[in-house]
Image (cartoon, rainbow, N blue to C red):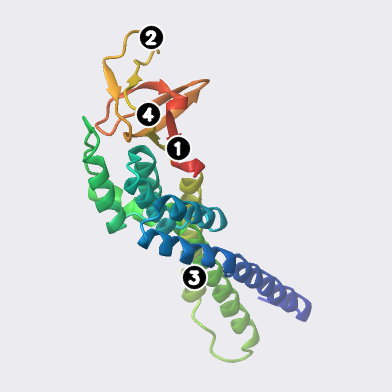
Amino acid sequence: MKLTLDKLKGLLLAGIIIVMATCQAFGGNNAAQASWDKANRLYAQKQYDSAQAYFLQVAKARPGVAEVHYNIANTYYRMNKIGPAVLHYEKALHLKPGYKEAQENLIVTQNRIPNHIVSAPDIFFVRWWHSLTAAGLADLWASLALVTFIVAVLVVLVNALRKGKKPIPAQVPAILVCAWLVMLLLGWVAGNNAAHSGIAVVMQNDVPLMGAAYKGKSQVYLPEGTTVKVAAINGDIAEVTLPDGRKGAVDAAMIRSIDNL
């Protein structure tokens, strides 16, 4: 591969710009940190409504942080608001699958739901895929893909500049490119999951579950805090799947998606 000095400068400049943009995106936020500290102090003082207001400020400044939604859920639970508590625990688990504390608190909260609908656990490889493509990992995969790309470019540059010397084996940049493509794929799926999870929570008691034709008297009434998977929304009607696999339709105004948090 023949590289001119101008091409080399262009590649290095592009790399510097990407790194600077990434550093800026992940930069600290002093105001959010102050709100986080204040919220935790208020929570420790059992001022749950005030603590929640500050946690919500942090969530707005730092979207996509599982720990923030976990703490918001805790404040709702302490104020006996089951639906919103489940909503934010689900958001925390969507961002960070395997989040032990959020999973445990979600179970405790769901145990307070009358006629709670129990879901069957996912099989191993489904849980494994979900853990790799969790919404909260989108930035991590993007950063790793960026680093891998820069390393691959550096390897190519080194080989181009090592005139007459033993080059780095061709398999190395090939492996780096494959890893870069895999990380891009995982990052894309994780980013898509962050924007379109399809997870929603019933926010009122005794919400009727209608049949597919949206007609007839409902035989099932969903309690507040029931988690559903939204397949589609047609006007004011949401087509949903219950945790036990049953399907039907509900009034879209009666549920709230974790995608909107």
Instruction: Residue 73 in the image: state x and y as whole percent.
Output: 37, 49
**Residue 29 appears anywhere in the view:** no
In the rendered view, does 186 fall on the left or right side of 117? Answer: right
Q: Residue furthest bottom?
A: 165
| Residue type marked 4 | Gln
Residues 122 and 37: in front is 37
| Residue type marked 2 | Lys
Q: Which mark is residue 176?
A: 3
Nearer the N terminus, badge 4 or badge 1?
4
Residues under labels 3 and 1: Cα distance?
A: 38 Å
SS class of the residue under badge 4? loop
Residues under labels 3 and 4: Cα distance?
A: 51 Å
Whether the residues at callouts 4 and 1 have beta carbons within 8 Å, the answer is no
SS class of the residue under badge 2? loop
Residues under labels 4 and 1: Cα distance?
A: 14 Å
| Residue type marked 3 | Leu
Q: Nearer the viewer, mark 3 or mark 1?
A: 1
Please name the residue that numbered disc 1 is placed on: 257
Residue at (57%, 70%) from the top-left corner?
28
Nearer the N terminus, badge 2 or badge 3?
3
Whether the residues at callouts 3 and 4 have beta carbons within 8 Å, the answer is no
Please name the residue that numbered disc 4 is placed on: 204
Q: Which mark is residue 215?
A: 2
- Depicted 225 relative to depicted 4: above or below: above
Whether the residues at callouts 3 and 1 have beta carbons within 8 Å, the answer is no
Q: Which mark is residue 26?
A: none
